[in-house]
Image (cartoon, coloured by chain):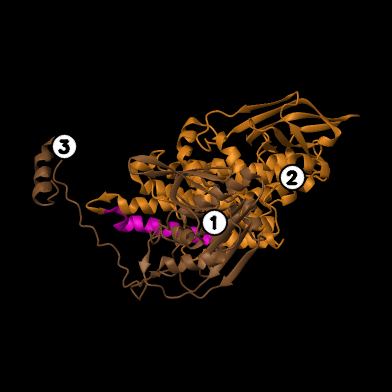
Amino acid sequence: MKIAVCIKRVADSETRVKTAGDGKSLDDAGVKFILNPYDEFAVEEALQRKEKAGAGEVVVLALGGAAAQETIRTALAMGADRGILLQTDTVPADGFVTAQAIAAELKGGGWDLVLFGKMAIDDYNSQVGPMVAELLDLPCVTAVAHLTIEGGTVTAEREIEGAVEVVQCSLPAVITADKGINEPRYPALKGIMAAKKKPLEVKPVSLSGGAIEVLAMLPPPARKEGKIVGEGAAAIPALVKLLREEAKVL
Amino acid sequence: MAPKYHGVDFYALDSLLSEEERAVRDTVRTWVDDELMPVIGEAYIEGKFPKQLIPGMAELGLFGANLPEEYGCAGLNNVAYGLIMQELERGDSGVRSFASVQGALVMYPIYAFGSDEQKKKWLPQMASGKVIGCFGLTEPDYGSNPSGMITVAKETKDGWVLNGAKMWITNGSTAHAAVIWAKTGALTDANSIRGFIVPTDTKGFSAKDQKGKLSLRASDTSELVLQDVHLPKDAILPKSGGLKSPLMCLTQARYGISWGALGAAMACYDEAVSYSKNRLMFGKPIGGFQLQQARLAEMLTEITKAQLLVLQLGRLKDQGKMTPQQVSLAKRNNVNIATDIAREARRLLGANGILVEYQAMRHLANLESVYTYEGTHDVHTLVLGQEITGISAFE
């Protein structure tokens, strides 16, 4: 099975981020970057598919700055076979520009499966996966929490509001992975050492500006301090009064 | 739930680590967060090593991680190995001790003093955690003075017979194989000390857990008795010779301990900082009071110094230039500052500091053992004294 996994380097959600001087981007200083957690599910799924098939290749593809090589090597340490970095100065705000570059790289590659995380935890756009599918003219199932592949048929389960949706399509296909699809492995120490020796191809790409421009990046407004109205049952009337009159939520 | 642990790096020392070294550190850190932290409190109270973690530790490659790949090990450099010890002991000294013993005290002597057959037979099984080992040097009456040991190995026509007792043996009751040090000549002849690989199911070998420990409770510590233990000829580690062989193992283990104790100190500092910002007293966080700030400033200073110490020690080890005396300095300093930091963190946490849901007191109790084992603080003081003056205070 030949599988491509498209990944993104993102700021760790545990780090406190600051906006840069231009007010439109993040200040990278002191920020820890990680493999996007949903992409980790995609990498794990690819490795499990390959292991189950007993043969094949897992190729990791990222678009970003030179530092994204480190993120690719995390996936190589987990067990992927080789990596490709489409190197740019900045990751475009317009997902379609990214999708075009990735689709151009994947086109004609003979992939059985193209995996993405269901979204990147930095921009929350959920765009690139389905756009790549469209550009490659492949079926696409997004936010898959359970995946079965038998013969050339994919059966995917999606957790939708109050139910599970079961979807079928044929291979080759684009799947975006949701939490629950698997339990990603730790990159073992031997894997980390082996990753150094695995091929990682760096291809500079020049991208068009796209149709979207970031005007400003603002931190959420500071939360107002809470108010303790009292303790125990005696405090309930005062609380209800405030919820009704001040917070106006009742 | 406690906030996520981010380590301590006030001097941007991450920039002195390679990408692989950071990746190794981060992997073990995540593993400790996910697998060890949720179970360690209960294991400690129950007084049991969390055995269920062994397969996961092996899968990650934590056992003998700085030994070569041909024996199923990860082949890491010594800085990466040190970082593993740091992260494991951030969780618990007992769990780090388990990995230290398996790697530095059991796999290392087999690697350094064993025959090719012994290496091929034992090392891959130990790297994969299928065979757990222990290290028998210390005896009930010979701790700081191992050359006085009275365990003996008598050569017979078809092998060896071992008699004696060993004490304070980490992993003793869990182990499948023990590396036992015994005198093959007269009791006065420390040069006759040799190492033996003893499968623990050999007739005459028994291990009994030491009860009543108030420290390292999540680690098995045992007494070993060897009564007419018959071993084949090839049980001896052929390249071992004299007391310096087990002391070489201890240098390896002490190197790891210098990093490990630092991990415990970092855990206590991290907990103390977070607590000082959240705990309110007299209407403001206790971190706003000068006495607590002095505590935290002292902790951060000592941690930063200790980090520089072990990093350079690791670089020297990787260049083959590290001396046992340098290891003595690092073990002595880092365990000492870690014990002090754990105690100050415990105090900063007030009454909550005595509870198992916080880490400081567990680390403090553990570090009292680490202070005493692998060469007591005092013995390392005298090693340095001898190094400085050229005069031994031992004799």
Taking the view exactly as shown, the residue that stands out farthest to the right is B157
Q: Taking the image as drawn, is residue A164 in sight?
A: yes
Chain B shade in the render = orange
Q: CA distance from mark 2 to mark 1?
A: 43 Å
Badge 3 sits on which subunit?
Answer: A
Q: Which chain is brown?
A: A
- Residue B298 falls inside the magenta stretch: yes
Q: Nearer the viewer, mark 3 or mark 2?
A: 3
Question: Could you confirm whether marks 3 and 2 are on the same chain?
Answer: no
Q: Which residue in the protein does label 2 denote?
A: B109
- Residue B320 falls inside the magenta stretch: no
Say which of A43 and B94 sits in front.
A43
Q: Quadrant of residue A57?
A: bottom right
Q: Nearer the viewer, mark 1 or mark 3?
A: 1
Q: CA distance from mark 1 to mark 3?
A: 54 Å
Q: What stretch of residues is rendered in magenta?
A: B285-307
Quarter of the image that includes the N terminus of chain B: top left
> Which residue: 63% across, 48% down?
B379
> Which residue: 49% across, 55% down?
A116
Secondary structure mostly seen in magenta is: helix
Q: Quadrant of residue B6?
A: bottom left
Q: Secondary structure at mark 3?
A: loop
Q: Amino acid at mark 2?
A: Pro
